Image (tube, rainbow, N blue to C red):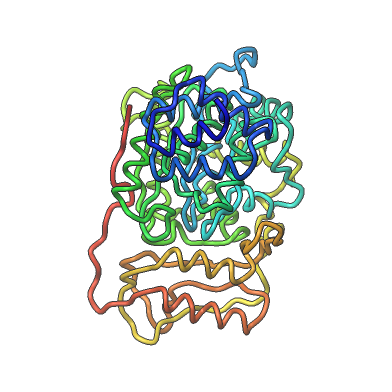
Amino acid sequence: MSPQELIIKKREGLTLQSDEIKAIVAGITDETWTEGQAAAFAMATYFRGMETPEMAAFMQAMANSGTVMDWSDAGFDGPVIDKHSTGGVGDKVSLMLAPMMAACGCFVPMISGRALGHSGGTLDKLDAIPGYVSQPDLDTLRRVVKSVGCAIIGQTSDLAPADRRLYSIRDTSGTVEIREMVVCSILSKKVAEGLDALVMDVKFGNGAFMQDFEKAHALATALVEVAGLATPTLPTTACMTDMNQVLGLTAGHTNEMREAIDYLTGKHRDERLHEVTITLCAHALLLAKLADSIEDARAKAQASLDSGRATELFAKMVRELHGPSDLIERASELLPYAEVEIAVEPAQAGYLSAVDAREIGYAVIALGGGRLKPTDKIDHLVGISDFRNIGDQVGPGAPICKINARTQAKAEEISARVLKACGVSADAPKLTPVIREIIKQ
């Protein structure tokens, strides 16, 4: 069938067959489908959706559009596992989770992304490390995963090229939010990694892309179901994480890298951030059959931190990917903050009762710590630090956070913006758990 016929079939709400889906993905990959045709298909899918078998076929075809990694000859004595997050403000979990999983016996080829919208990207955070090569070739990925146990890198041109082209088209055609294509985009890259299992961190709330819990829940459910139909089956667990405030103490690239190092070394571990990280690690270990129960898995995840093994593997990963060999010891020197710092203090004392985390993300972008267009250069040194959690007491002398900026004027501008995004009440607010639900196959 021609591209036009396939677009019309989806537009009319009819079910696409496996060979038709393969033809669509092949056309997107080799560019015999124009951008306009791919965009029209995406828009038709936006309105008509896909059934679960269609999603599974579309995802598998995108995974097979490039290299599918095979670790069978690597000689690993443990499973190959990755984690994916749908993103949120202050989400630096991957930076700690990859070495923690590796310390527990997993092998982790973690393919991460760059900033998208208001949400920071793991690769942009890693680019704050002097010399770190965040997008090596696949041979380097294989070598580092084998020698260290983990490597956090970006998607290469070899992995799921159909997804890379289609995502770019969706980004400019108003179709980024299509649940079915989000599912296929995420899972195609994970299947191409040759994983044995996958743990998902699906965010909801004002700091997440899907703010509505029910919509995020539907996404998480679809991810788990479609992964179960992958060839071969990809065992997957999804954790539903509340992003109605900044996750952790920081937002911004250098800021978040330093918080991740403080977390690994035990200098400071924010309670909500710790719960998310330990929970994801524990469920990864259950999927990997490296723990007998959730209690056993959580204990092993904690032991990876307490023993210093996770910190050791993080440092080794950085070194193997050409970062400094002494990053842990010289973090404050190698990862400096912007020179101007001011405290954000509300006029009246009370409890931090609400945070518009999305607005905090945009505030970091306004500082220069994000992109308004793809060609923009990120300033890694600007950001926000020491952000209080909802329920903490704030007021004069007890700041909500600190702004790290290049100029006093910009720091004051962003301080006012942050204050406007935060609510302070006389009474302590009711606290909600950071992990709302666990969805399993």
Give residue 166's quadrant in the image.
top right
Q: Nearest the camera: 95 or 141? A: 141
Which quarter of the figure has residue 156? top right
Q: Can see residue 213?
A: yes
251 relative position to 240: left or right: right
Q: Is residue 393 above or below residue 28?
A: below
Q: Is residue 125 left or right of residue 375?
A: left
Q: Residue at x 47, y 36 (%)?
A: 8
In the rendered image, the quadrant that contains the N terminus is: top right
Q: With 340 as the anchor, is 49 left or right in this view?
A: left
**Residue placed furthest toward the bottom:** 347
- Relative to 145, residue 85 above or below: below
Where 394 sits versus 441, above or below? below
Task: Give residue 120's position: percent from left, percent from top.
Answer: 55, 56
Q: Which of 268 and 134 lies nearest the eye of the viewer? A: 134
Residue appearing at x 44%, y 32% in the figure: 9
Q: Is residue 129 left or right of residue 232?
A: right
Residue 379: % across, % down: 68, 64
Count of picture labels: 0
Position of residue 281 measured from the top left corner of the image (x, y, whole percent): 43, 36
The picture places residue 432, in percent across and down from the top left corner, at: 26, 56
Residue 302 seen in render: no
The foreground one among 141 and 103 is 141
- Quarter in which the C terminus is drawn: top left
